[in-house]
Image: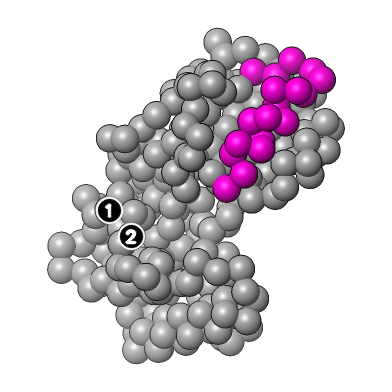
């Protein structure tokens, strides 16, 4: 009988923010699948999940290239999906761990889509995780949306001009991965026509955690794990 695959969101950084369901599965499965760059074996998701992982569980690191080349990425997704299927077909239950939530800007989403193509009948359970922007909102007591307000989630890798156009139609917004075009994004926000209250945060829930409500205090070259909350109402 084929094993069961779990896609588990381990949250933004604090091991205590995993759900009870996620912790139970991690303490039971014999195989942990952790995504990492092809340049190294580092896995922040694994570091976060480690306190909940079964002590004798096997760890397999799946290498994914940091590339925007569709061909390169497609090859990596298929190779990793076949590796995962091999383990599942051997009867091993496995947990693929990912930062934040498995279905929001996550490597797991690409793997899941590829698995659905290669093995449509494979059993998969997705266990949601707390997102980084939810953790930042909680830490700063920032209301993400209320009444009839909308909330827009954007990737910072888009051009600053495109982000501005999108933000013009939003009441409140989250910009994830705000590291790529941060300087340009900051300049756009400084000239934004409507008052917008901003929270900048990086490495949420980790010892290097940094939070500021001032764009001027944000670093010029933020880390990969950086985001911004933009709201029309001030934090409580």
Checking the image for residue 43, the label placed there is 2
3D distance between C-alphas at marks 1 and 2: 7 Å
Q: What residue lies at 60% left-to-right and 22% top-to-bottom?
A: 198
Element type at mark 2: loop
Give the x, y percent position of residue 165. Answer: 83, 38
Task: Point out the image quarter for the C terminus.
Answer: top right
Nearer to us in this view, 36 or 146: 36
Q: Are the residues flagged by discs 1 and 2 in contact, CB closer than 8 Å?
A: yes
Element type at mark 1: helix
Position of residue 62 in the picture relative to residue 136 (left or right): left
Checking the image for residue 188, the label placed there is none
Q: What residue lies at 44% left-to-right and 43% top-to-bottom?
A: 223
Magenta stretch holds residue 186:
yes
Above or below 32: residue 80: below
How packed mark 1 is, by other alpha carbons closer than 10 Å (few <14, some 14-19, many 20 or more), is some
How packed mark 2 is, by other alpha carbons closer than 10 Å (few <14, some 14-19, many 20 or more), is some
Query: Quick check: can you spot residue 120?
Result: no
Give the x, y percent position of residue 113. Answer: 61, 73
Q: Which residue is mark 1?
A: 47
Tally the marks: 2
Magenta stretch holds residue 191:
yes
Nearer to us in this view, 156 or 170: 156
Position of residue 217 in the picture relative to residue 52 (left or right): right
């Amino acid at each position: 009988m084929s094993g069961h695959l779990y896609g588990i969101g381990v949250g933004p950084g604090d091991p205590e923010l995993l759900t009870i369901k996620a912790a139970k599965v991690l303490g039971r499965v014999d195989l942990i699948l952790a995504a990492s760059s092809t340049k190294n074996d580092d896995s922040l998701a694994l570091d976060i999940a480690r306190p909940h992982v079964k002590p004798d569980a096997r760890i397999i690191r799946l290498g994914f290239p940091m590339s925007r080349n569709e061909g390169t990425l497609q090859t990596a997704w298929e190779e990793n999906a076949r590796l995962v299927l091999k383990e599942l077909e051997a009867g091993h239950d496995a947990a693929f761990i990912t930062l934040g939530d498995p279905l929001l800007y996550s490597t797991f989403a690409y793997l899941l889509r590829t698995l659905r193509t290669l093995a449509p009948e494979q059993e998969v359970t997705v266990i949601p995780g707390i997102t980084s922007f939810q953790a930042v909102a909680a830490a700063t007591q920032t209301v993400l949306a209320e009444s009839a307000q909308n909330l827009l989630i954007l990737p910072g890798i888009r051009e600053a001009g495109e982000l501005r156009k999108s933000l013009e139609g939003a009441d409140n917004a989250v910009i994830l991965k705000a590291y790529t075009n941060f300087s340009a994004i900051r300049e756009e926000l400084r000239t934004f026509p409507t008052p917008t209250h901003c929270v900048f945060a990086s490495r949420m829930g980790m010892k290097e955690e940094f939070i500021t409500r001032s764009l001027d205090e944000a670093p010029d070259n933020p880390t990969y794990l950086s985001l911004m909350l933009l709201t029309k109402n001030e934090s409580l």
